[in-house]
Image: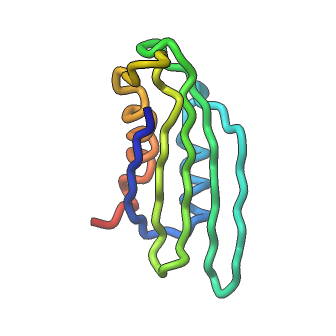
Amino acid sequence: MADKFQFNVKVNPAVAMALIKDGMGTGAELLHEELNNVGEGRMIGTLVYERYFLRSGNQAAMVIIADNLQGVCNIRLISAGSSNSMIFKVDWGAGRSFASSVAKILSEYTIE
């Protein structure tokens, strides 16, 4: 089951990624990180995390994409793999919980 969330923040992608990395607990493992500067202050970055959720009995993955290609820094959170069944894709809220942890980290910088 995949959950997708999106919001804007008032910091650039490099700062947003640093805040996320500093704020994620020890239960989440950073699997991949990249930040690309495309010029004129525009950047796009990706973080990929994995975390075990007891409630679903499974590892969940989350891809975090941060970019300011359209002027404002947009954060996209995609959680996946949190369902423990091949047929019924029920994750008992694990994907939403994983994504909300990132949203909470950036809540001080979120633009309404």
Q: Residue at x 36, y 61 (%)?
A: 110
Residue 24 or 40: which is nearer the viewer?
A: 40
Q: Is residue 45 above or below residue 21?
A: below
Q: Is residue 6 above or below residue 82?
A: below
Q: How is the image coloured?
A: rainbow
State the quadrant of the C terminus. bottom left
State the quadrant of the N terminus. top left
Q: Residue at x 48, y 39 (%)?
A: 79
Residue 33 percent coordinates (x, y): 71, 50
Residue 53 or 91: which is nearer the viewer?
A: 91
Residue 82 percent coordinates (x, y): 48, 26
Residue 84 percent coordinates (x, y): 48, 16
Residue 26 percent coordinates (x, y): 61, 27
Would you say 49 lies left or right of 4 here? right
Furthest toward the left, the residue is 112
Q: Is residue 106 above or below residue 80?
A: below
On the image, which quarter does residue 18 sit in? bottom right
Q: Residue at x 47, y 16 (%)?
A: 85
Would you say 34 lies left or right of 85 here? right
Residue 102 or 61: which is nearer the viewer?
A: 61
Q: Is residue 19 above or below residue 13?
A: above
